[in-house]
Image (cartoon, rainbow, N blue to C red):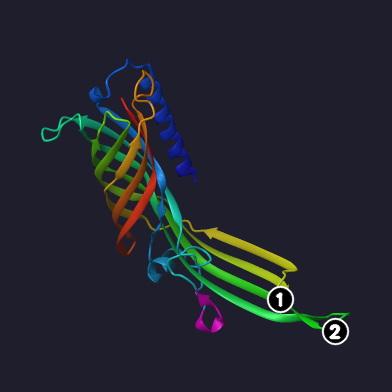
Amino acid sequence: MSYSIHLKLIATAFTLVAICFNGQAQETKPENRSVEIALTTGFGDSYWASLSDATWNKYTPDFVIPTDSSGYLQGFSTGYPYGNPYTVSSYLLGSVHVSYKNAFLDAKKIRSSVGLVFGSGIGYRSDQSWTKSESFTIDTLTSSQTGEQYIVDSTHNHGIGRSYEANDFMIGVSHFFQTNPLRRFSLHLGITASYGFSVNARMSTYQYDWSAVTPSLGVNDNYESTYYRTEMTDAPKSNSLTLQLPVELSFRPWKNGKMLQGLSLALAYRPTLKHFVIADQKATNIANWYGVTMRLVI
């Protein structure tokens, strides 16, 4: 998506500039440094929005819901096309922190910092789908050697549905504690509170056809499929409040030297409590975000 690509390019450029600045700066002790720039990317399960029929109908007014007598079966009401309720989304967060002198902690053992966090969080998904399957015999084959007969079936599947998806832009404040800041390995513990709003929200309708000619031997002799999607001109927006408790295990490759001594890489785990509102739906969700962090101390 263009939004995610632009955000990643900006964040990457921002990090490269900071690295260049760090390389040109005079060598300083890590304990004297006070500004931290970090970039975290990873993945987690999408947030499923159980939109009401009223919301669906408002944004897809021309969509016709199949009747009970039409032979269609309804799939997941909070899933993705083809009825899959489990979709993984990615996130990309940047942050800038400033360390401060904590009167209650030994600065040589634990570094305290406060700062801002911003970026693209894990998005929202929702779907309503209906499928109909028909099978009938179109031919019978007879073996010239054994006389055994094989039935040739034709199967046709037709599906219709409507889907919703949106990215979530987050901005907030955070507080971190870093253990053993002067050593090669360290642990980061923090708390982050942020406000989020949807960007690139999309509502669309779709339909697909799947046909196959299958002998009773179990081999597809012919297979055809088509898929059509129509995007609506408007979609519901979201607002959210998010609380996270980040835990990161970091490794500093270059402990000494003039260049990149402030650079570290970390494995990140972010337990997340999110409350969000989309149209007439309100929900609170607990999720786990996983990722990696690149941090530069200047």
At 85% from the left and 80% from the top, the residue drawn is 143
Q: Nearer the viewer, residue 117 or 190?
A: 190
At 61% from the left and 76% from the top, the residue drawn is 133
Q: Which mark is residue 226?
A: none
Question: Position of 239 compared to 221: left or right?
Answer: left
Q: How many marks?
A: 2
> Mark 2 highlights which residue?
147
Question: Position of 275 compared to 127: left or right?
Answer: left
Where is 39 relative to 245, above or below?
above
Amino acid bearing label 1: Ser
* Residue numbers of the magenta segment: 67-74
- The residue sitting at the top extreme is 26
Q: Nearer the viewer, residue 160 or 104?
A: 104
Task: Classify mark 2: helix, strand or loop.
Answer: loop
Question: Position of 79 compared to 149: left or right?
Answer: left
Q: Are dots 1 and 2 in contact, CB under 8 Å?
A: no
Where is 96 relative to 145, above or below?
above
At 37% from the left and 69% from the top, the residue drawn is 52
> Mark 1 highlights which residue?
154
- Would you say residue 273 sits in the magenta stretch? no
Amino acid bearing label 2: Gly
Q: CA–CA distance between discs 1 and 2? A: 23 Å
| Mark 2 neighbour density, 10 Å: few (under 14) some (14–19) many (20 or more) | few
Where is 137 relative to 192, above or below?
below
